[in-house]
Image (cartoon, rainbow, N blue to C red):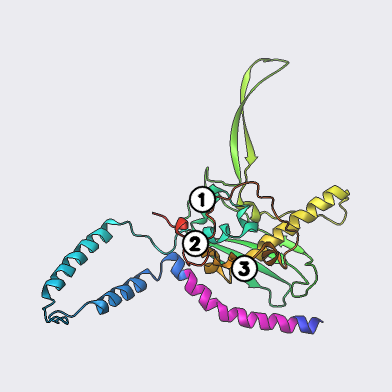
Amino acid sequence: MKEYLLERAKLEARFGAMMKPLYEERRKIVVGEMDEVFQKEMEEEEKRKKTPSGETDEGGENNENVDVEEGVVEEEGEREKEDEEFVKGIPQFWACAMGHFDVISELVTEDDVDCLEFMTDVTCDDFPDGTGFELKFHFSPENPYFTNTVLTKRYEVPNLLTEDEPILKNVTGTTINWKKNKSLTHKEVTKKQRKKGGRGAGQIRTVTKRERTDSFFHFFSPPKMPKMEDVLDEEEADAVEEAFDFDYDVAQAFRGHLIPKGVLWFTGEAADGLDDEDLLEGMEGVEEEDGEGESPFPPPVPGNGENQECKQN
């Protein structure tokens, strides 16, 4: 069995390496590194479509006047283009893709979306021996929320390549270095309290408390593994198991769906025609939602390859 798992790990690594150039090309398009190339291709295509000056149409009339009129229209179009704000790459690409996968979108708040706009790529590196994987979330240095350029989530799963229920040996996240007053996972709340008894009774004092807020970025602070000596009652044990199951499902949603098919999840086409059973296949601990709560993301737009509501004006 061990030999089989090692050989399978090598095979998956081989095909994974073949996909990386495609993922890198996708990253370049998302961040805008290919904008100039595409712009030149569009300009060349427009030139090819133009009618050569001096040609006559079937009626024998000269096209010179038509060319002049087309030139005027083109000049006006160029002025309009200059007035429009230039959009670099594909804004909110990963935020939209994440929003179309229910297991992930339910974790994401509207404030998270603003931060996720600075996410440039998501990658996954499987361990050479097939006993785990590491997700890497890449962010632009211009990100105003935290100083990290890469957030990682590492999963040690000895039976990752088997059909058995996954056994998590260890899960490691990342400490996010939030910039001042930019934390999305906690907020400081100032409250006034009146002293009830003793000296200074009736005096009002100001107390600042740090409160947890809903955010996708809690994903990088995984549940704590209970120690061998810890004694948990049935309710506590169930809560720990449920937390790890859900955390692992989110990780597998990125590893098995969003990373290999990011473009199709961005447009919503990946979910078109799939029911809940298809999406949850191979994922543990996820139950169907009752529809309560609203996602900050637009619904998928099947078939047309473009999600207009994800664009910025």
Residue 40 position (above or below residue 247) = below
Is residue 227 within the magenta segment?
Answer: no
Q: Which residues are magenta?
A: 6-27
Using the image as rendered, state which of residue 135 and residue 264 is in the foreground. Answer: 264
For the point 65% across and 62% down, which residue is it? 153
User: Circle 2: is it few (<14), some (14-19), or many (20+) Cα within 10 Å?
Assistant: many
Label 1 amino acid? Tyr
Label 3 amino acid? His
- The residue tagged with tag 1: helix, strand or loop? loop
Q: Position of residue 130 (x, y in %)?
A: 72, 76
Residue at numbered disc 3 = 257
Residue 143 position (above or below residue 60) = above
Q: Which mark is residue 94?
A: none
Q: Distance from label 1 to label 2 (Cα)? A: 18 Å
For the point 32% across and 73% down, which residue is it? 42
- Pick whichever of labels 1 and 2 is earlier in the sequence: 2
